Amino acid sequence: MSKKKKKKRNRSQRKNEITKGIFTVLEKEPSQSFNYKQIASQLGITDTQDRNDLIKRLGQLKATNRIIEEDRGKYKKKPSLHTYFTGRVDMTTSGNAYVVIEDREDDVFVPFNRINKAFHGDIVEVFLKPKRNGKRPEGEVSKVLERRKSTFVGIVDKQKTFAFVRPTDPKMYTDIFIPLEKLKKANDGDKVLVQLGEWPDDTDSPYGEVIEVLGKPGEHDTEIHSILAEYGLPYTFPHEVEQFAQTLDTSIKESEIAKRRDMRDVLTFTIDPKDAKDFDDALSFQQLENGNYEIGIHIADVSHYVLPDTILEDEAFDRATSVYLVDRVVPMLPEVLSNNACSLRPNEEKYTFSAIFEMDDKAKLVNQWFGRTAINSNERFAYEEAQHIIETKKAEIPKEISIRGEAYTVSDDVKDAILKFDELAKIMRKARMDAGAISFDKIEVRFNLNEKNEPESVYFKETKEANKLIEEFMLLANRKVAEFIGKKKKTFVYRVHDEPDEDKLLALNGVISRFGHSINLKDRKSINSSLNQLLEDVKGKKEQNLVDTLAIRSMSKAIYTTDNIGHYGLGFEYYTHFTSPIRRYPDVMVHRLLQHYLDGGKPPKEAIYEEKCKHSSDMELLAANAERDSVKYMQIKFMEDHKDQEFLGVISGVTEWGIYVEIIENKCEGMVRIRDIKDDYYVFDERQYAIVGERRKKVYQLGDEVYVMVKDSDLVKRHLDFSLIGKKE
């Protein structure tokens, strides 16, 4: 190549670099305009020839309308025809999607043919196309920035030379191609967990690899493990974590007790569900010489065993929470800790972290103390046993509610302590409600399971005085620990709950008006008092579960953060989670930070804890979804044995494709599809929350009572279809 040609090519290459540089500068700050000197400075151009090329190129780009000259000699990026946003994909079961964008009122609709390989939950870049002919604006995904998940549960469809896995998630719109060598011995029809691989441009499906065979669809363990796998939640501990936990010294040493406040001789007991395996909180009680009471809230000292920079710590952080499914608990910590060393079992010495309060007869706090302690619990009670003492004021526990399997009598000291706790808790609860707290006592569905984990009956968890007693003292400890640190303005982990969204409250008002209820939206005090009245008014009524659910959904979600904005639902300015470190990682962080400050330590970097808070909030949401799905699965399993039975239900939801009906006696919810209602052609009326027959004008409206039977059930997809028999007259 001649020197002349080489020089010419280098000059052309340099001009291309200058062009790219111009756009880099202008796109970095699209609202600003720049003259050639400012651009040259940012690009590091000092050569006269290059500067002349820059001036010439600016003129050419302006002439071809690729940039604009805002003022004389000052250039700016031309506004794009499309507006770009970053948001999260929300797929619909129809295959279209919406991109949810923070600080934007309307979500961006994206038709299926413009999703461009984005999946539900992915963070994407989307550009918004201009409105045309008055139609709503549509978007197109231009780039997938972050995949929400890379593993999917599905069913194997095996062919001679390859296989596909059909995901069970209705929002996953594509199957996954699996080469035979990556099937991991899975057979046709098996339920598996797949790791997503590349999705080449010239293929209809992404590639994947089977990483776990879950079992045969419909089998109990297969479905429970599938629920966990869908949310990326583990159901076993890695061998090395179990091994590490087994090597921990869990013996109680006098040398360690000497560093703590020794409370082994103080009357102490636990009150938990009758089937609880771990006991992470205990109450102690003693009357002081001045007539006041010393109340101890003692929490398992998990941070004594789970130390930073260990594989046990890493595993606890990754899990962030225990997961409570219908038939099992998937613990955050290995059993050697959760059920043994850290469980405050009766007549065993334990290390604890405590909040000790001096309180008078009117539940007014006189003094407080926080720190590490040692205790020895005298008794273990089930809620039913404590409730019996509260109701009868007697020390005798009858055999039918005894967790010991026989009748027994508690000491007068224990009986009197429980009655005093109940008395103080009621005073504290009233003060809390008067201060604007909201009382959510949503019905919780529970199952009586046989030895094969099959549901024999459904019952509802009741919240009585014994439950509220424990709740009030745990709330007290959580609030006072947060207040103790929060008032010093130091880095800390808070449990916060923002104010409800006004639009959601208006929507809630619209729904509950169908049942003759309303919320006063005048101000915060009016909202809270009318919400409490609403929740009280619906108790025991057909619409209770629906109203409770909708009221909770109208609230913001509680999260963990270092930025304290208070807890709206509880009415607290300061609140944290201190009382359950066996099952919640944020509580472990709170214990460590509290001890760090008690030792005179300086505040650590907030950003590190904020990141851990976000992870903990995310994992809490996944666990809640898994728990909800396991209940749904068990409800469907229960209803499979009642296919010939007629049930009375309440219409709990109305959509363009059908009505959802919740059976009153067991809270199982299923769908009646519009196409299956044969007596008329029904259309969806969004304003009335109803479907309306075109000819006879018959209306099925939210809240109506109807009779239904099971038409079809699908354990794999966790879906229940009902046949509509008719309205209750």
Image (cartoon, rainbow, N blue to C red):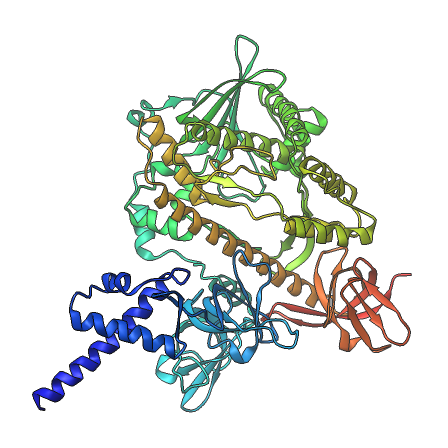
Is residue 646 in view? Answer: no
Quarter occupied by residue 714: bottom right
Instruction: Pinpoint residue 463: horizontal percent, then vertical percent.
Output: 67, 40
Is residue 88 in view? Answer: yes
Q: Is residue 151 above or below residue 514?
A: below
Residue at 9%, 91% (x, y): give it. 1
Instruction: Pinpoint residue 62: horizontal percent, then vertical percent.
Output: 37, 75
Which residue occupies the extreme left position in the image?
Answer: 3
Q: Is residue 253 above or below residue 5?
A: above
Residue at 52%, 63% (x, y): give it. 227
Instruction: Pinpoint residue 174: horizontal percent, then vertical percent.
Output: 50, 79
Quarter occupied by residue 655: bottom right
- Looking at this view, is 252 or 103 the one in front? 103
Quadrant into which the C terminus falls: bottom right
Quarter occupied by residue 607: top left
Instruction: Pinpoint residue 525: horizontal percent, then vertical percent.
Output: 69, 35
Relative side of 609 to 361, left or right: left
